Amino acid sequence: MIVRIEIDAPPGGLFDYRVTDEGQTLYADAELPSLADALVAAVEGLAPEVAGAEVWFRGVVSGTYPLHVIGANHAQIATHAANTTAAILEALSASD
C-alpha cells in the first residue's frame, strides 16, 4: 500500500499532517514544530503493510518515496517538499 502524507502550515508557524489512503484519513496530528517533525511523526504511525508514501506540502505533491528512504532522509525530503511548493506557488502567482 502507498499512502498520502498531507502536511499543511496553518497560520501560527506550526505544522499539521494527516495520513490518508484512497481519501480516507487513517490518522492525523497538529501543531508540530517543523515540516521535518511532521513528516517523521506521520511515518512513525504507519502500519507494516505500507510500502511507501506520497508526500504533499500545502497541496503540492513533492514525490513518492519508499518508507525506508523517508526514514533515512526525512530532513532532505522536507526541504525538497518546501522548495517544490514554493516554486509551484511562485509559478502560479506569476501566471495570474
Image (tube, rainbow, N blue to C red):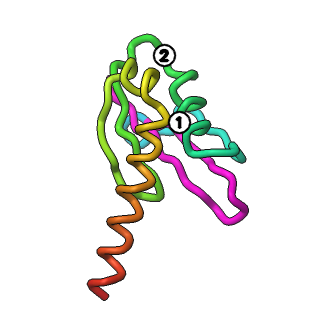
Q: Is residue 54 left or right of residue 75?
A: left
Which image quarter is the C terminus in?
Answer: bottom left
Of badges 1 and 2, the one in the foreground is: 1
Residue 89, percent from left and from top:
38, 70
Q: Nearer the viewer, residue 54 or 13?
A: 13
Q: Residue at x 30, y 36 (%)?
A: 64
Seen in the picture, residue 91 relative to 10 is either above or below; the reply is: below
Residue designated by label 1: 39
Residue 86, percent from left and from top:
41, 64
Which secondary structure lies at badge 1? Answer: helix
Residue designated by label 2: 47
Tell me the amino acid under the disc marked 2.
Ala
Seen in the picture, residue 50 relative to 21 is either above or below; the reply is: above
Q: Which residues are magenta?
A: 1-20
Residue 18, percent from left and from top:
54, 41
Which secondary structure lies at badge 2? Answer: loop
Few, some or many C-alpha atoms within 10 Å of disc 1 (few <14, some 14-19, many ≥20)? many
Looking at the image, how many numbered discs can be counted on the residues? 2
| Alpha carbon distance from label 1 to label 2 | 15 Å
Please tell me whether residue 13 belongs to the stretch shown in magenta: yes
Please tell me whether residue 5 belongs to the stretch shown in magenta: yes
Few, some or many C-alpha atoms within 10 Å of disc 2 (few <14, some 14-19, many ≥20)? few
Q: Residue at x 59, y 39 (%)?
A: 38
Seen in the picture, residue 10 relative to 43 is either above or below; the reply is: below
Mainly helix, strand or loop, the magenta region? Answer: strand
Q: Nearer the viewer, residue 62 or 24?
A: 62
